[in-house]
């Protein structure tokens, strides 16, 4: 709630509120969004009982559907591949895909896509190409921990680079299990011991050196080590006991989005809970709509996406931001209302950022004797 809105609701003058807060050391304007503490203090002052209204967060939307343990089933792990540029992330993803997906099924697999699901020993694994560091952090800060397992790719002929270090700290902060893929072992200049030593220095000690991080030598060129990598992912996944409810309200993370000619807003998603179906009323951050079409990771039109499955969704009224969460709602009105409320909230926040208390306002308060102390930061 902004100062102006609160003033209206409490039948007070905005300037009165601004003064009270100023004396509490808080500088606000009529457009500032108030934090919970300020609202409570002001309500005490005005003898009003505050009531907190659901801020419509993604989690609060889907949570009422997180049911009993008995509805939960095992879901495939979602694996993100990260690493320094040119160390072979994309090549590795393409190689895994081409060895696991029958030609023809994916229309020849010529184009690289950002996420897909493969099968190993009858178990599924969903892979995601590094969504860029910014996007990855955005997903984390929004609480959208889509990744279950992180693979850090290090070229064995090049070793640890600045971006590798950055990725290590991202990966550690995420709390996910980490597997190190030492890529390009087909090269004559490959030096696995060098990679291990450099990684150990960064706190990632290999198993065979007495640490607890799995290091696997792979080649995106020849395919060597890929089966071992997949087996390791499945072992890690089993330990995580990943579960979700296929009958819950669908909840899917947006990992990519764009505006396409003739198709409109397109969102690439990974289903985190429930089943996303054509016809679902959806809300996604400040956008909403109804699922018009779904394309799976092989480019085929499908009717639904299940747990940990990935595909593109058509039907939103606007392009959602990466890292936002798509949630299915019972009615289109609900979806629209939530999106609209969020958009208004976002606008209010933006507005409150762009305004500052003017010097005149402040000296006015000082002149009136309302301010005896001036909190400053030097
Ligand atoms: P990314 O930036 O991490 O996605 O790296 P790319 O997948 O684009 O690969 C960078 C370069 O390394 C390309 O020229 C690839 O052909 C090459 N490359 C990737 N993996 C291997 C590998 O296992 N062996 C060899 N010899 N070259 C590789
Ligand atoms: Mg790449």
Image: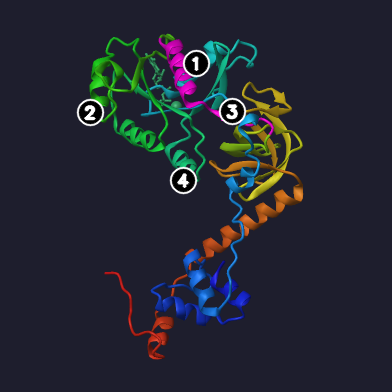
Residue at point 72%, 25% (across, down): 302
Label of residue 308 in the image: 3
Label of residue 96 in the image: 1
In percent of width and height, residue 156 lies at 30, 18
- Quarter of the image holding residue 371? bottom left
Specify which label sits upstream in the sequence, 1 or 3.
1
Q: Is residue 319 visible?
A: no
In percent of width and height, residue 157 lies at 29, 18
- Quarter of the image holding residue 6? bottom right
Residue at point 35%, 19% (across, down): 214
Specify which label sits upstream in the sequence, 4 or 2.
4
| Residue 233 belongs to magenta span | yes
Quadrant into which the C terminus falls: bottom left
Residue at point 62%, 74% (across, down): 9
Q: Which residue is mark 2?
A: 201
Specify which label sits upstream in the sequence, 1 or 4.
1
Cα–Cα gap, marks 1 and 3: 18 Å
Residue contact at pointers 1 and 3, CB within 8 angstroms: no
**Is residue 84 placed above or below 121 in the rendered structure?**
below
Mark whose residue sits in front, 1 or 3: 3
- Secondary structure category for the residue under label 1: helix
Cα–Cα gap, marks 4 and 2: 28 Å
- Mark 3, ligand 2, within 8 Å: the answer is no
**Is residue 159 placed above or below 329 in the rendered structure?**
above
Q: What span is in magenta?
A: 225-247
Residue at the limit of the structure toward the bottom, as seen here: 368
**Is residue 201 placed above or below 333 in the rendered structure?**
above
Specify which label sits upstream in the sequence, 2 or 1.
1
Cα–Cα gap, marks 3 and 4: 21 Å
Q: Which residue is mark 4?
A: 141
- Secondary structure category for the residue under label 4: helix
């Amino acid at each position: 709630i902004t100062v102006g809105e609160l003033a209206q609701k409490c039948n007070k003058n905005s300037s009165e509120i601004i003064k009270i807060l100023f004396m509490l050391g808080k500088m606000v304007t009529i457009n500032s969004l108030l934090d919970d503490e300020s609202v409570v203090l002001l309500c005490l002052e005005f003898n009003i009982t505050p009531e907190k209204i659901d801020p419509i967060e993604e989690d609060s939307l889907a949570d009422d559907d997180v049911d009993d343990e008995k509805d939960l089933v095992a879901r495939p792990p979602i694996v993100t591949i990260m690493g320094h540029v040119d160390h072979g992330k994309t090549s590795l993803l393409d190689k895994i895909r081409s060895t696991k997906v029958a030609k023809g099924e994916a229309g020849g697999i010529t184009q690289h896509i950002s996420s897909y699901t493969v099968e190993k020993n009858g178990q599924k694994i969903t892979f995601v190409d590094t969504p860029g560091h910014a996007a990855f952090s955005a997903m984390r800060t929004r609480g959208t921990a889509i990744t279950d397992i992180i693979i850090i790719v290090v070229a064995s002929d090049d070793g640890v680079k600045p971006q590798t270090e950055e990725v290590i700290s991202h990966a550690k902060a995420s709390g996910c299990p980490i597997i190190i893929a030492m890529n390009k072992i087909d090269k004559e200049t490959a030096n696995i011991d060098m990679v291990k030593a450099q990684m150990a220095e960064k706190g990632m000690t290999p198993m065979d050196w007495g640490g607890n991080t799995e290091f696997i030598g792979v080649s995106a060129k020849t395919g060597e080590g890929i089966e071992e990598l997949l087996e390791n992912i499945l072992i890690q996944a089993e330990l995580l006991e990943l579960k979700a409810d296929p009958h819950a309200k669908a909840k899917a993370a947006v990992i990519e989005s764009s505006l396409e000619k003739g198709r409109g807003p397109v969102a690439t998603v990974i289903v985190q809970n429930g089943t996303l179906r054509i016809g679902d009323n959806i809300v996604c951050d400040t956008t909403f709509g109804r699922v018009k079409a779904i394309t799976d990771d092989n480019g085929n039109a499908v009717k639904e996406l299940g747990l940990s499955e990935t595909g593109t969704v058509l039907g939103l009224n606007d392009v959602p931001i990466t890292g936002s969460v798509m949630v299915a709602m019972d009615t289109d009105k609900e979806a629209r209302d939530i999106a609209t409320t969020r958009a208004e909230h976002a606008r209010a926040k933006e507005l409150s950022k762009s305004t500052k208390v003017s010097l005149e306002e402040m000296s006015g308060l000082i002149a009136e004797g309302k301010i005896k102390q001036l909190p400053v930061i030097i």
